[in-house]
Image (tube, coloured by chain):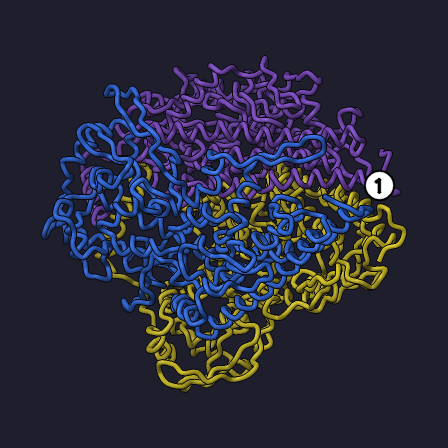
Chain colours: A purple, B yellow, C blue
Amino acid sequence: MGEKRNKFMALIFILVFMSFSSGWSQIAATISEDSESCLSCHSTFNSAIISDWEKSLHSKVMPVEALKKEILKRRVSAQKLPEEISSIVVGCAECHTMNPEKHKDSFEHNGFKVHTVVTPEDCGICHPEEKEEYGQNLMSYAYINLNDNPVYRDLINSINGIQTFDEGKIFFKTADDKTNSESCYYCHGTEVRVVGLNTRETPLGEMEFPVLAGWPNQGVGRMNPDGSMGSCSSCHTRHSFSIEMARKSYTCSECHKGPDVPAYKVYEVSKHGNIFSAMNEEWDFTSVPWIAGVNFTSPTCATCHSSLIADKNDEVIIERTHRMNDRLWWRIFGLVYAHPHPASANTSIIKNKSGLNLPTELSGEPVAEYLINEKEQSVRRENMQKVCLGCHSVQWVENQFLRLENTIQTTNEMTLTATKILVTAWDKGAASGLPHNSSIFDEAIEKKWVEQWLFYANSVRFASAMAGADYGVFANGRWYMSRNIQEMKDWLEFKLKGQSKKK
Amino acid sequence: MGEKRNKFMALIFILVFMSFSSGWSQIAATISEDSESCLSCHSTFNSAIISDWEKSLHSKVMPVEALKKEILKRRVSAQKLPEEISSIVVGCAECHTMNPEKHKDSFEHNGFKVHTVVTPEDCGICHPEEKEEYGQNLMSYAYINLNDNPVYRDLINSINGIQTFDEGKIFFKTADDKTNSESCYYCHGTEVRVVGLNTRETPLGEMEFPVLAGWPNQGVGRMNPDGSMGSCSSCHTRHSFSIEMARKSYTCSECHKGPDVPAYKVYEVSKHGNIFSAMNEEWDFTSVPWIAGVNFTSPTCATCHSSLIADKNDEVIIERTHRMNDRLWWRIFGLVYAHPHPASANTSIIKNKSGLNLPTELSGEPVAEYLINEKEQSVRRENMQKVCLGCHSVQWVENQFLRLENTIQTTNEMTLTATKILVTAWDKGAASGLPHNSSIFDEAIEKKWVEQWLFYANSVRFASAMAGADYGVFANGRWYMSRNIQEMKDWLEFKLKGQSKKK
Amino acid sequence: MGEKRNKFMALIFILVFMSFSSGWSQIAATISEDSESCLSCHSTFNSAIISDWEKSLHSKVMPVEALKKEILKRRVSAQKLPEEISSIVVGCAECHTMNPEKHKDSFEHNGFKVHTVVTPEDCGICHPEEKEEYGQNLMSYAYINLNDNPVYRDLINSINGIQTFDEGKIFFKTADDKTNSESCYYCHGTEVRVVGLNTRETPLGEMEFPVLAGWPNQGVGRMNPDGSMGSCSSCHTRHSFSIEMARKSYTCSECHKGPDVPAYKVYEVSKHGNIFSAMNEEWDFTSVPWIAGVNFTSPTCATCHSSLIADKNDEVIIERTHRMNDRLWWRIFGLVYAHPHPASANTSIIKNKSGLNLPTELSGEPVAEYLINEKEQSVRRENMQKVCLGCHSVQWVENQFLRLENTIQTTNEMTLTATKILVTAWDKGAASGLPHNSSIFDEAIEKKWVEQWLFYANSVRFASAMAGADYGVFANGRWYMSRNIQEMKDWLEFKLKGQSKKK
């Protein structure tokens, strides 16, 4: 308490001094005429959007001022800014009328060419490095990597397609668009397309608006009407675009919480997550660079995967990146086996020997030509380790990473065992899959196989990587991974019992 | 930071000015003699209750002052207050000795007629509108709707009843009261009855207290000793009765977190929930009215379902209601099929064609006479949309609601498929249920059927309604909904294998 | 708001007064020469550790000052402190060079005998009572109780061991050390041993470091290189050692969150947990003693199980203990049946009639000689009730505890039913277990049996003990406990179908 009082008193003196010296030196924020025009109506309609924006740096700092900061503290990566936007704050019009020629969703609105869907291309005017990096990120291809991969489309239909029961048999329908939009494509991103025009009565009379398919959506790989991919607002939530929010793991948890990718669940139960939960009220989530040990005492997702981190001596621990791949050497989730990270962000191009768009064979062997090599793995592993070494000793870090390497091997082995049971089921006609040109995801035994890798092996690897032991054992990890093998074996036994032919 | 400094400095000047002008203008809080009498002992015994109450508005604001506020900012709905309580703060005696003639739990205690269980009837003295509305809320009938419905009682016994195993067979016992009180009735409410008197040695000598069955309990549909139903303290937690607490979703989560009603889980993983988690420290949870975009930048449960919301121009976005039904047009959980909201808060009166107390047939067809019609559905849908439109565009909202409508249809179809498998199992004697006048909840296949709607279809609908995609796919949604059909089918196959007769 | 303003204004006046009177009275913190020497390098390497330590009381308060506090407010339990550490703050060297003669991990480092692994023995110099109590805590034996119990080792191997599938059969391998270290032993503690020396290139030239097996680890029962057991930093997280963090339930959740011990999950959904979540920002987590109703309005784990709690009149409600057993009369989790708490912290010595190291027979009968008797149970129950009575009435508390007693009986009955099905499976050769001197944990039916007690009965008991009803019904409780019996019965039926011999 004594210390807090000290700080508090000091703050008062500083403030009194400041108020008597140079006055408040902040340059008045200038809003563009165009944005003032937007505000004149929208302060009444959907006014909470405006209130939210008023809390943002965008509403308070002009890009020209932002550019003056020393490089380490800078939040815009452009070297030079278009004159027309540099000396006004970033308001409605600055984003929603940017690049109108590219925007198929641009429409005439009170004399402006307005578009609904703001894209990385628009944000990239001030933040070009982030746009560039993000474009090479696996995330920006999340729609394509799902939609253009027949294996995954089969998976989607097996999950989202309606099943009917008739005369003892199950029939599948293809999943519908609305369902897909609110499930898989919610995170992966939808394709947002203009499919018509709609005239609507508004408080200001009749108005015409484009009809958008796939809207609303802020998925990380959203296909935008201007041809760009991704959505900055997935993490930098509209309309306050707070760096605090992007740095808190809650944001990432929106798409990384389920059993298929339980990063947040594991974080929550790790020492790191517990320090965050207990102490984050006292941290500074807005400082650039982000000072380890001073601004925060435990990493969030952003710390390890994206942020510019420095130490208290302003030495850079790791550079900022929006190409999260830079610090990822294995891909530990989402696929049948863990494997070296894909070389290209577009994974729909990958094909294994059996013709499946998968980065490994069903035996676990990696399809090496599409994956990074050991040297690149080392570079990325060292990137990640730099972050760890900010707070941990060399031996600590090395042993932690050795455990993960071991777990990648053992979980892959356990998946192989499940795969062998499945293949036996296919071979003996207990289920119908790859050898029958039939879905590999729709029957009970196939679903158990999927759970083996998509839920259990994944979870164990996350728990290993982030030291969230409690999750990796009983919550959704090794307990189920070991149980599942036994249940698959029993299922096969029950299925084959007393039958000579099947299906 | 600059802006924060400005605000801080301004605050200091205002405070200095105020301290030199009229002094601190708050009228001193007067505690009634009766309450002083309570405090004289209970500041020693169970003193933390008193400390908690001291933090409440009840301990600080006299009703007469509360009534002076302009209507939009008012926290009491009474037009006029009984003179004896208007000019004192709301202390122990004001609630615990209110309406003694109605309270069967009232007992002589140091010269006072005191009762333990404070009820909506008591709170209604100052908050009559809230009491009135809550009485028409599905929640206030939560005990009756569970206890007076034979279908649900069968469900309770199948879950809470002890099973024994003897000579290869399972036998069920009826669930006991203590178990029911701490499980289903914890949220739904118990029946609290005086069942005797008990003399106990206390620090002040021997004293006599009523013995209460079903106590403790703060379930939303609690049957109170004064004949009233419900408990305000379910959400307005004793003894600080903080509006902040009621507005935070944690409070609702106490009963809306499990897989049967995963509202909180879905919220937590939605964009709304993530904004809340990351930013709520900076919000104002005590303002009345609650200003969208200013006091908060993302809704909590209360925002959408109950609170009085205004915009920054003090225009009302939606009026306060404690009859949550006002903003609910479908019932999406707890029943076999989603269906239009029940017309009466008492759902135990509903009966379908097969004589079951259910709002739909087993085929999914709604029992229309007990449910609201399409017109009323429209009114309620529009109520909810008003809240959404505070922050979202018309097209955004419309498309979001269309997705939900679609999901209501598709989840009902998937439940129908499960129902057909179950009925086949009954018909072929693989399980014993409706056609055999036997429980429809106690066998493995029946439990799988229950999970299809009570867990999976419910979860998918919540995930759709609140845009919590991650929950609705793998966490507890479509993945399991699709898997369950396959497992039900296989179970039936295994059960029928090599047998001609059964049970 | 009025009240906040009052407080704020008062604070300003106090501060202004203080600044004009005696100056800031805090005695300057003196760092030892040895610690200064550490800091001279480590402010550069792993500097975030230093930044974290700078936030700790250790860096600010000299033990000699800490000892001057009145006994109720004191944070060190030593009566007298070694002179060499009493008038300096507790820095790097004070802990990492303490007791070098005992530390097998001590190594020459720039002229110092430094050790990596700081232990309860080291912390005990200033905190001897806590060390003493913790040593009698079940937790300090967590490694031994797991590792020296053949039943549990069998369980570990059945979960962590790799399974392979060959010619229709499953084969098990013994679990490897790395896997065990990051799963079970992460919480229980590893054995940390020096297994060699390693020379490493550092920024200051070549240096030699001990190679530590089982490192990193902060498990509660860690076997330390100085022969001591446990790790204070499990809960008092390095290097800020904040009491705030230890008192927040997040810390406990690191090991008490999974379905095997869902204390945190249940807390989260209880009224207590919801009050915490909604209101804890306004609480004081650093006050010693911790004042119920004033510093906090709802308990955390520490409140009920460990902390020194007083009321607003500074009357002690319950004394501090680091032997959590003091307030625990039943053991409700982790074992087949709930049973009276073990008498000795070392449970690996327990053996039942069948020779299994378990505190009950498979029938549920307690192995009484190793367990506390009813009298001791009463003492401990009353300890816990003292905490409850701080905020709740006698009847409230008594009824709550009666419900728990009932639930202990009913959950044990449901486990017995599951055990009978399992034994039948063994007897009929459907599975191979105890009668065949085979693992009792590795087959599907055995795993279902484990889930009956380790997940479901446990969860129900936690939900009862902490009034987290929502968890104990559908989340992971009675629903599954009742379903599991039916599934075990069906599994047995399917297994036996059409077969005369088996295994």
Nearest the eye: B92 or B485: B485
Q: Quadrant of the C terminus of chain A?
A: top right
Tell me which residue sits at (77%, 32%) in the image. Answer: A174
C415 is higher (above) or lower (below) than A333: below
What x and y, as percent, mark residue C466? 49, 61
Name the foreground residue: B289 vs A275: A275
Q: Position of residue A223 (x, y in %)?
A: 61, 24
Q: C345 above or below A423?
A: below
State the residue in front, C35 or C468: C35
Which of these two is toward me, C135 or C479? C135
Looking at the rendered structure, the number of numbered marks drawn on it comes to 1
Q: Residue at x 75, y 43 (%)?
A: B487
Seen as rendered, the residue at the extreme left is C22
Amino acid under label 1? Answer: Gly
Residue under the image location 17 percent in, 47 percent down: C62
Whether residue C453 appears in this view of the structure is yes
Q: Establish if A369 lies above or below C119.
A: above
Local secondary structure at mark 1:
loop
Q: Percent from the top left, x then y, of residue A278?
A: 38, 46
Q: Position of residue C13 (x, y in %)?
A: 19, 54
Q: Which residue is mark 1?
A: A498
Q: Quadrant of residue C417?
A: bottom right
